[in-house]
Amino acid sequence: MPRVKIPRKSTAIDMTAMCDVAFLLLTFFILTAKPKVEDPVPVDTPRSATEVTLPESGVALITVGKGKTFLTLDGPEMRKQTLLQIGSKYNIGFTPNEVKQFQNLDAIGVPVQSLKQFLALDGEQRKAFLASKNGGIPTDSVSNEMFNWIREARVVEKNISGKELRFSIKGDSNEEYPTMERLIAILQKQKVNKFSLITSLRAK
C-alpha cells in the first residue's frame, strides 16, 4: 500500500502586531529621551563608589570649572520667568526675541550686564565667550550675582510647582577650594543646606 504524502504548506507568520509594538517602543523612547547637555566648561568630576539617581525635574545644576560658575535651570518657562525677575531686579528690559534666545540656553554663565551682548551672539561665539575671562556668573562679594540668580530661581520654582528648588553641584576634581567655598556659602546664606554633588561612578 503506498504511503500517503501530506502536502507541504509554506509557513506564514503575521508580523503586523510585532511591528506595531516595535514602533510604539521606538516612539516612546524618542519622546521620553532627554539630550545630554554640554557643559559650559570641561569638567572632570571626582570619582565615587555609590550611585544615586537625581530626579528629572525640580533640580538646578551649578557647574564649577576653571574658577567659574554656571547655572542650568530646567525648562523654558522656568528660565523665562527667572530672566524676567533678574531683569526687573537690575532694571534691564529684554525683548521677546532675547527672552526666546535665553529660553534655549543650556547654561547661564555671564555677568548680567553682558547678558544682552551674549544673547546677540551665535552658538560658536557664545562658547568662546563662556571660555573667555568674561565667562561665568560672578560670585565675589562685590557683585554676587549668583546669589540673586539662585534666589530668583527658587522663587520661580515655588510659584510654578509649589515646591522647593533642589540644587546639584557639578565641580571639577581639580577646582580650587575657595571657589567651592564661596558657592556653598551662597547656598547656606539662603538656608539651602542640602544639595547634591555630582560624581562619576568609580569602576569596580
Image (tube, rainbow, N blue to C red):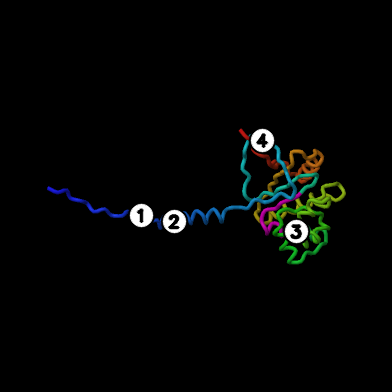
Name, please, the residue furthest toward the left: 1
Kind of residue indicated by mark 3: Leu
The residue stretch that appears in magenta: 70-82
Q: Secondary structure at mark 1?
A: loop
Kind of residue indicated by mark 2: Cys
Left or right? Give the position of 97 relative to 33.
right
Left or right? Give the position of 5 relative to 107.
left
Q: Residues within 10 Å of mark 1 (few under 14, many from 20)?
A: few
The answer to which of 136 and 13 lies nearer the viewer is 13
Name, please, the residue furthest toward the bottom: 96
Residue receiving disc 2: 19
Residue receiving disc 4: 48
Counting residues from the start of the chain, the first of labels 4 and 3 encountered is 4
- The percent position of residue 18, horizontal first and vertical second, equals 42, 54
Counting residues from the start of the chain, the first of labels 1 and 3 encountered is 1
Q: Secondary structure at mark 2?
A: helix
What residue is drawn where x is 40% and y is 56%? 15
Residue 183 on the magenta segment: no
Find residue 83 and name its label: 3
The answer to which of 165 and 117 lies nearer the viewer is 117
* Mark nearer the viewer, 1 or 2: 1
Counting residues from the start of the chain, the first of labels 1 and 4 encountered is 1
Q: CA distance from mark 4 to mark 2?
A: 42 Å
- The percent position of residue 55, horizontal first and vertical second, equals 62, 47
* Mark nearer the viewer, 4 or 3: 4
Q: CA distance from mark 1 to mark 3?
A: 58 Å
Which quadrant of the figure has residue 168? top right
Residue receiving disc 1: 13
- The percent position of residue 197, horizontal first and vertical second, equals 70, 41
Kind of residue indicated by mark 1: Ile
